[in-house]
Amino acid sequence: MTQKIIDFSKYSSIKIGQPEIVNIIETDEDAKEEGFVIGGAYNLLVSQSPKKLLMLSSSYDYIKESNGMIFVGTATTGGKLMSYAKKNNLAGFEFLTYIPGTIGGMLAMNAGVKEYEIFGSLSAIRFTNGYKNNEEIKHEYRKAELPGIALEAVFEKRFGYNEDLIEKLKKMRSNQPTEPSAGSAFKNPTGDYAGRLIEAVGLKGYKQNGMCFSEKHANFLINLGGGTFDSAMWLINEAKKRVFDKFGKKLELEIKIV
């Protein structure tokens, strides 16, 4: 297994962190290593003392077809798969519109938009010990209990790329800020919206040492420049406290902290 140094203040989407050693998974045997797979670091907040970090090599970046199924390496980006689906008139991948990151990261958090999520299209996932069908993996809104590092996602090949759905999904994402962020900070509580709750407790636009809950969408924690891990955590904890004190609801993080 090789290693590389990644500066997370530049690599992560929220632009917070420092240079860290990352182990590169180049074979299935390497994938048996314990650690946190960073993917594209799009929903990641790196602490000053992170867990052991892993990253899949380019050998897991591929899209193949066989016997009516599509096999996608988990280092493949959602954008690459989306382009492939459009070019080949494939249905079931429209949810990837404007969702950044790798397929592996999307599987780990059952990524999607509203009711459209990756497990809704998924047939199976390959791990070091073989394939597991969708139904064998416990998953729910923005969460999946993967029994190891996902190496390949398998989808049934269906035709009918839906341009109307693409436009609908683009409109759903149009209120997202463009500043550096890690995506939605919190999962939406049942029957409510995290953004509404954060705004209701006075934190929309609230700034703390370079970090801020966006004026455009309160559930996005953005880096205005010079934001730090500590200031991000202060805002996260303040949001949890205020929302619970006022509404009795516990906000659950969608951002992954390592």
Image (cartoon, grey):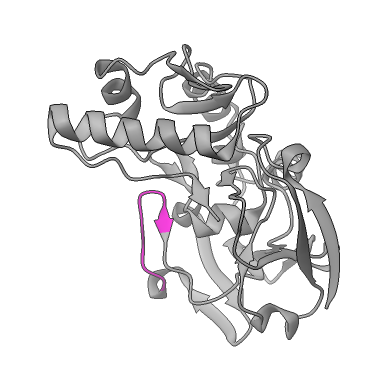
Report the magenta residues as a range: 137-143
Q: Please indicate whether residue 209 sits to the left or right of residue 240 in the image.
A: right
- As displayed, is residue 116 above or below residue 155? above
Can you say whether 92 is above or below 224 in the image?
Answer: below
Q: Would residue 152 appear left or right of 19 to someone viewing this image? A: left
Q: Is residue 157 visible?
A: no
**Could you say where residue 202 lies in the image, as x and y percent from the top left?**
30, 15
Q: Quadrant of the N terminus?
A: bottom right
Q: Residue at x 36, y 68 (%)?
A: 138
In the rendered structure, the answer to whether residue 84 lies left or right of residue 51 reads right
127 in relation to 108, above or below: below
Q: From the top left corner, tell me how far across and down residue 24 is, in percent.
A: 79, 69
The question of residue 141 being in magenta is answered with: yes
Judge by depth and name the residue closer to the eye, 151 or 93. Answer: 151
Identify the image quadrant of residue 32: bottom right
Q: Is residue 159 visible?
A: yes
